[in-house]
Amino acid sequence: MSGQRSLEMYKAYQAGAQKLDYFIIGLSAATFAYVVQQYKPHRIAGFLEGLEPLSMILLLGAVYFGLRRAERVVEADRWNFVALKCNEEIAEGEKVLSTSVTFKVHTTSATFENREELSAYIERQKRDRQDAQRRLLKLNTATQQDYRLRNMSLGAALVILTVHRLLVPYF
C-alpha cells in the first residue's frame, strides 16, 4: 500500500518537474524571440551596446541547455526502466531457480531448456542492470549540469536585459 502511494507521489513530482522545465524553455525561447524582434543591428562601440547581443546569446544558451536537459531526462527514464526491468527479471529468475527442479524452467518472460540457461540469462540481466545504472549516474550528473547552465544563462540574460533597458536611455 505504501509503495503505491510513493509511486503516485513520484509520478506527480515528475509531471510537475517536467511542466516546469518546459515552461522555462518556453519562457527562454519567447524572451529570445522578443529580444531578436526588437533588436536593431548597429555597430557595437561600447559596453552598453554589447549588452543586448550578449543577452541574446545567453537566452539562446538557456533554450539549448533546457532542451538538452529535457532530452536527457527522457533518456534517464528509459535507462531507469531498463534497470527496473532487469531487477524484476533477476528476482523472478532467482525465485524460479530456487523452487524449480524440473528440466524445463518457465518464467513469465521465457522458457529455458535447463537451469544453466536460466542462470546465464540472470547473469546477462545483472550485467545489463549494471550498465543501466552506470548510464543513469552519468546522465544524472549531466542533467544537473544542464540545469545549472540553463538557469545561469537565463538569469544572467534577464539581468543583462534589465540593466540594458534601464541604462541605455541615460547614455
Image: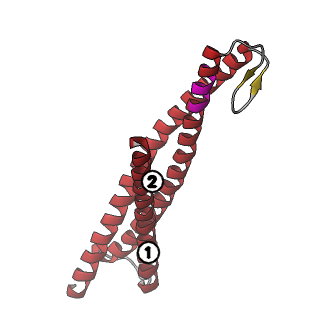
Residue 170 in percent (x, y) is at: 20, 86
Q: Amino acid under label 2?
A: Lys
Visible in this render: residue 115?
A: yes
Q: Main secondary structure of the magenta part?
A: helix
Give the magenta-colored segment's residue range.
88-94
Q: Choose mark 1 or mark 2, whichever is in front.
A: 2
Q: Is residue 87 left or right of residue 66?
A: right
Residue 51 in percent (x, y) is at: 33, 73
Q: Is residue 20 above or below residue 84?
A: below
Q: Is residue 153 above or below residue 89?
A: below
Mark 1, other Cα within 10 Å: few <14 / some 14–19 / many ≥20: many
Which image quarter holds the N terminus? Answer: top left
Examine the structure image and report whether residue 118 is included in the region drawn in magenta.
no
Q: Which residue is nearer to you in this view: 42 or 146?
A: 146
Mark 2, other Cα within 10 Å: few <14 / some 14–19 / many ≥20: few
- Checking the image for residue 11, the label placed there is 2
Which image quarter holds the C terminus? Answer: bottom left
Residue drawn where x is 57% and y is 26% of the image: 91
Disc 1 or 2, which lies upstream in sequence? Answer: 2
Q: Which residue is mark 1?
A: 32
Residue drawn where x is 40% and y is 79% of the image: 43
Task: Give the quadrant of residue 123.
Answer: top right
Visible in this render: residue 57?
A: no
Residue drawn where x is 39% and y is 59% of the image: 150
Residue 129 in percent (x, y) is at: 57, 30
Residue 83 in percent (x, y) is at: 55, 35
Q: Amino acid under label 1?
A: Phe
Q: Which residue is nearer to you in this view: 34 or 106?
A: 106
